[in-house]
Image (cartoon, rainbow, N blue to C red):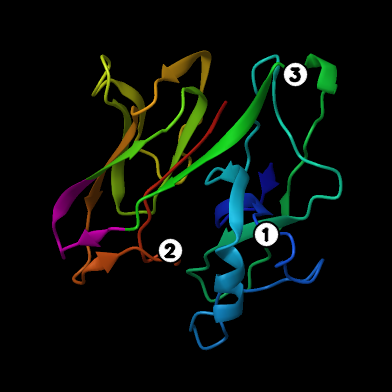
Amino acid sequence: MKGRSNSHHFLVYGFNNPSFIPAENKVRDLRNLDGSLNLTTFAEMQNHYFIGGGSDVNATVTLPEGAAIKIAPNTPVDLNAHYFNKTKLTLQGENYVNFHTVPASSVKNEVKMLDLNNTSINLPPNQRKTITKNFTFQEKTHILLLTSHNHKLGEKFVIKIFGGPRNGEVLYENTDWEHPLTKLFSNPIILNPGEGLTSEVTYMNTTNRTITFGFTSEDEMNIIFGYYY
């Protein structure tokens, strides 16, 4: 992926229901000119599943040999670019993403995407607060890659194993919200049914207002992204 400065994130999504997709090659803003939420775009986003991307828009991800994401021919994708502009100048956004293929005969493990989102965020003014949420899996899961997404009030994002003999083991730590660590596991993290991951995010609300989950750079988020099979 490549992107210009002042980028907050660049994400690639697929659509769960291919019969409910927007017009092709049309730019859709999440906000109207008055700053209100564009309900049509918001509804379209509820049909998303994560394919790739993240906060660091200048990044390369290489999956282990024998592992690949399966994308059917003619699959529509939604390119989600988020920029912020704190200046009085007009800034230009620009993003690129390339996918590189491998022969199907070389693939042993079909990779799926993790998108574990905690929207229960409530940060009192001028206080530090840690928010924790557990996510459990119903099948045996091999974790290949983890990365995180939060906004500027996030001081530290920790991902731990939840349940089983390795309960509480730290797999991932990140303290740079703008360029979060993307951690690839050469030996997959194996989790059994009923086990999972815990997100533990510490925020410092330096503002005089309560901050909750939201889509702007002045709101907050708490998402584990990753790949597994």
The amino acid type, in three-letter code, at marker 1 is: Asn
Q: Which residue is mark 2?
A: 217
Q: Closer to the camera, 117 or 82?
A: 117
Looking at the rendering, the stretch of residues picked out in magenta corresponds to: 120-131
| Residue farthest top in this picture | 187
- Which mark is first along the chain, 2 or 3? 3
**Secondary structure at numbered mark 3:** loop
* Disc sitting over residue 17 in the figure: 1
Classify 199 as above or below 212: above
Which residue occupies 68% across, 65% down?
Answer: 92
* Disc sitting over residue 107 in the figure: 3
Which residue occupies 39% across, 54% down?
Answer: 151
1 vs 3, front mark: 1
Residue 62 visible, this angle: no
- Which mark is first along the chain, 2 or 1? 1
The C terminus appears in which quarter of the rendering?
A: top right
Q: State how far apart marks 3 and 2 are (Cα).
A: 39 Å
Q: Is residue 197 left or right of residue 111?
A: left
Q: Is residue 202 left or right of residue 101?
A: left
Which residue occupies 60% across, 78% down?
Answer: 40
The amino acid type, in three-letter code, at marker 3 is: Val
Q: Quadrant of residue 126?
A: bottom left
| Residue 226 spot, x, y in % from top left | 52, 35
Residue 228 visible, this angle: yes
Q: Quadrant of residue 202?
A: top left
Which residue occupies 62% across, 36% down?
Answer: 59
**Secondary structure at numbered mark 1:** loop
Classify 196 as above or below 127: above
| Residue 129 spot, x, y in % from top left | 17, 50
3 vs 2, front mark: 3
